[in-house]
């Protein structure tokens, strides 16, 4: 592989990760195109230096804020849409052997978040322990960092009980596993 082909593969991964339905209804036309453009230019090589979940969260929060502020019109500042898009894209990058090996980022897998949407929230609600409290789910548009962190912690607990990484719960929850 050459850097040129790796860049093409990153662009393809962004295109496939963020489909029209991924960010439907997030406040303005152009949200999907903005997210794809952002992910195509992300400097993935910087991710190889991350050595802790805290470090990963710092980088993810930074990208979430920057992407949300690039969204057009009424979607500007939509934290939930930006976080969902980034989580789906980064999952695609780690799932892609060529990108993962090129950038040496396989070590990020334990820290990746499950992309939150109504399917995942319903799955989390069904699998959480009775004493685990969740915030009220409204929509991706209204999702904030504090609520997201709470959902992600419960998802991490569920994943631990099921013997998988949190990111992989999306395989089970998305359309209830009916692919």
Image (tube, helix red, strand yellow):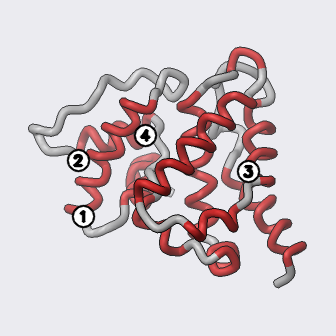
Which residue reaches farthest right? 4
Q: Are marks 1 and 2 in contact (CB under 8 Å)?
A: yes
Whether residue 178 is visible to the viewer of this picture, yes or no, is no
In the picture, measured across the screen, residue 3 lies left or right of residue 167, that is right
Q: Residues within 10 Å of mark 3 (few under 14, many from 20)?
A: many
* Of labels 3 and 2, the one closer to you: 3
* Of labels 4 and 1, the one closer to you: 1
The tag earlier along the polypeptide, 1 or 3, is 3
Residue, disc 4: 119
Residue 148 drawn at (x, y percent)? 40, 36
The tag earlier along the polypeptide, 3 or 2, is 3
Residue, disc 2: 127
* Mark 4 element type: helix
Q: Nearer the viewer, residue 124 or 111?
A: 111
Residue 103 drawn at (x, y percent)? 67, 74
The tag earlier along the polypeptide, 1 or 2, is 2
CA–CA distance in space, label 4 to label 1: 18 Å
* Mark 1 element type: helix
Which residue reaches farthest left? 131
* Of labels 1 and 3, the one closer to you: 3
What residue is shown at x 25% (from left), y 54% (from top)? 158
Residue 37 drawn at (x, y percent)? 81, 45
Q: Nearer the viewer, residue 105 or 35?
A: 105
Whether residue 51 is visible to the viewer of this picture, yes or no, is yes
Residue, disc 3: 39
């Amino acid at each position: 592989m050459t850097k040129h082909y790796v860049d093409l593969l990153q662009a393809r991964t962004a295109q496939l990760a963020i489909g029209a339905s991924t960010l439907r209804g997030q406040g303005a036309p152009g949200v999907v195109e903005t997210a794809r453009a952002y992910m195509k230019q992300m400097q993935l090589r910087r991710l190889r230096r991350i050595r802790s979940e805290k470090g990963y969260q710092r980088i993810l929060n930074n990208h979430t804020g920057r992407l949300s502020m690039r969204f057009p019109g009424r979607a500007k500042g939509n934290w939930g849409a930006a976080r969902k898009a980034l989580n789906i894209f980064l999952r695609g990058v780690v799932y892609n052997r060529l990108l993962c090996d090129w950038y040496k980022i396989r070590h990020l897998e334990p820290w990746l978040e499950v992309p939150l949407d109504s399917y995942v929230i319903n799955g989390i609600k069904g699998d959480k322990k009775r004493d685990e409290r969740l915030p009220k789910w409204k929509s991706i548009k209204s999702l904030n960092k504090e609520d997201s962190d709470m959902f992600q912690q419960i998802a991490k607990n569920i994943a631990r009980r099921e013997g998988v990484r949190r990111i992989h719960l999306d395989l089970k929850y998305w359309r209830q596993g009916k692919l």
